[in-house]
Image (cartoon, coloured by chain):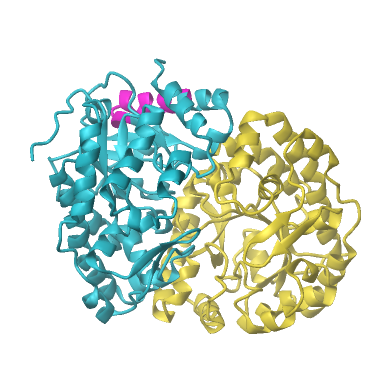
Chain colours: A yellow, B cyan
Amino acid sequence: MSRRDLAHAPLIEAANGRTPSRTPVWFMRQAGRSLPEYRKAREGIPMLDSCFMPELLAEITLQPVRRHDVDAAILFSDIVVPLKAAGVDVAIVPGKGPVVASPVRGRDDVEKLPLLEDTVDEVADGIRIILGELTDTQALIGFVGAPFTLASYLVEGGPSKNHEKTKAMMHAEPETWHALMRRLVPTITAFLRMQVEAGIDAMQLFDSWAGFLTERDYREFVLPYSAEILASVAGEIPRIHFGVATGELLGAMSEAGSEVMGVDWRVPLDVAASRFATPKVLQGNLDPALLFAGPDVVRAEVARIKGEAARAISTGDATGHIFNLGHGVLPTTDPDAVTEAVRIIHEEQ
Amino acid sequence: MSRRDLAHAPLIEAANGRTPSRTPVWFMRQAGRSLPEYRKAREGIPMLDSCFMPELLAEITLQPVRRHDVDAAILFSDIVVPLKAAGVDVAIVPGKGPVVASPVRGRDDVEKLPLLEDTVDEVADGIRIILGELTDTQALIGFVGAPFTLASYLVEGGPSKNHEKTKAMMHAEPETWHALMRRLVPTITAFLRMQVEAGIDAMQLFDSWAGFLTERDYREFVLPYSAEILASVAGEIPRIHFGVATGELLGAMSEAGSEVMGVDWRVPLDVAASRFATPKVLQGNLDPALLFAGPDVVRAEVARIKGEAARAISTGDATGHIFNLGHGVLPTTDPDAVTEAVRIIHEEQ
């Protein structure tokens, strides 16, 4: 396929270090439980099934673009979708998260882990539907889960508050850990390449749990594999890299190769930029909890955040700014508060 | 009462900036679910009830001291104990945490919040039992919950992953927030003073959720109140201050006045010390997940952590080191792994 020409899409301009016509904004989890039309569309359909239904995943991806006037759609997917597509027995349990039937505990389990060898046509078809609906100022961001977070689900058997089995494997059986990461990289890369071939305009690598690691462990056990995945699409589309509570890791994560670094709300953007190994486009970082505090608070926070980004750009620590939250939209957020926030962010200041 | 003379207790020596005879160590949540004798002692007794039973809370406090040879006992209590003692309708729901029957949502709720006016004799009696059992090299650390974390339970109505109601109140109704904090300080201070009068040798202010705040918000909405509580026992006993995921807050928290700063596992101790406003005794910071990785891993981590503390002391950024975890003992931890870790920490290196 030939890639869409999004030369005038604000998000792509910002991601490429050019000055966009308006501050681009999208919100992590903008598609999902905060929207009544999402809850209606998903009714009776298990989460993971919905990620393999082209029309439905396209509809869910497009809902927040229609409603909120955001500058990008984020592909509706889940971090375990490539595992499911590869044949791993995994389900998303409501109120809990991904649960893996046979957790990975040793080297044998690693070797038995299926690899993703097909092209996940359902997702590719969904992407083509989405692209047919978006204007050429609206970007579609592909969804890619990072290998550490995926490995944590596999080793723990599900969501974990403390990741003790994962960290124990890293430290007590580092060869098993590295084998697991090497095993996951081709599956994740295949899932990403499929999205690129289907036409995504940018991608975000979600390393949700990376903030539970020390910088030492991140560098030794995670960084090379995330870097490999990002490298697989270098020069093709802008790449965004994000994890929650990663203040201590921003330097290390910035070495993984993305053009854009997502920053959680705890670290002011100019402080974050000063930790990068090389200048990056900033993405973030309104605290999603503040969408519950009313438009006056949001306006003040947006002004502060834009100011911090501008300061980082003026010192040369950053090369642009894409507005986002510092974590995902909370499920109980009033959708109108999200729409209003987007309007405020788009106002000239 | 006259305070115990613990001039030769390693933890007190370290907390006072002197060189102890061995590296003092205690572990957050050393008393509790990881111990079979705890599960037996608590059988059939609701958590919050157990915090008001003198013999039982003393027994639970002493169990890990007997078993692990740690250098301090931490009073078995809970952050909501002073609220319960004041008459707030609060329960600790197994598997969930503290649940408040009537959450604080507005100024009226704040004014109606009962103040702690009695001396909580059950806890004072428990402290006297504990002190009768400890040697003069074993310190008893009092347990004090910080006002932000307590306020979060009151506003959210229970544990919260995102603290959205709390943050919304801070930003949208700052006067209500400050009134709530002013209302909580005397109750917390009364609970602390009772412990001091009963004879505790040191105290830790637990601000479990502080790491969910930005530094700006921490300074504006939390720091003055935590400082006031710490100031109420200045010069009487060593004071420790701790919160999880507080890497961005270490500078601000270090201004609250404690002699000792607890550091979570994400930040190397020498890096943490470089963020303090003034030199402090370091406390921490083994990742509790690594107690699942076997003694060789623990030995290597202990050596690294001791080295980082020694480096901070040698540069003058820190004035001592108390070993601890970077968070609490996880409930599924093998108690023998804890005992072994204490032995390793006590080895000369």
Residue B78 seen by the camera = no
- Is residue B310 located in the magenta-colored stretch of the structure? yes
For image coordinates 64% across by 70% down, the residue present is: A10
- Give coordinates of residue A286: x percent, y percent: 48, 66
Instruction: Note whether B217 is above or below B278 in the view shown.
Output: below
Q: Horizontally, is A112 left or right of A94 in the view?
A: right
Q: Residue furthest top?
A: B348
In the image, A258 versus A248, the foreground residue is A248
In the image, A318 versus B180, the foreground residue is B180
For image coordinates 25% across by 47% down, the residue present is: B255
For image coordinates 48% across by 41% down, the residue present is: B34
Q: Horizontally, is A295 left or right of A198 in the view?
A: left
Instruction: Note whether A111 is above or below A245 in the view shown.
Output: above
- Give coordinates of residue A304: x percent, y percent: 41, 66
Q: Horizontally, is B234 left or right of A150 in the view?
A: left
For image coordinates 22% across by 65% down, the residue present is: B86
Identify the image quadrant of the C terminus of chain B. Answer: top left
- Give coordinates of residue B171: x percent, y percent: 35, 72
- Is residue B55 located in the magenta-colored stretch of the structure? no
| Magenta stretch in the rendered image | B303-321
- Give coordinates of residue A178: x percent, y percent: 72, 34
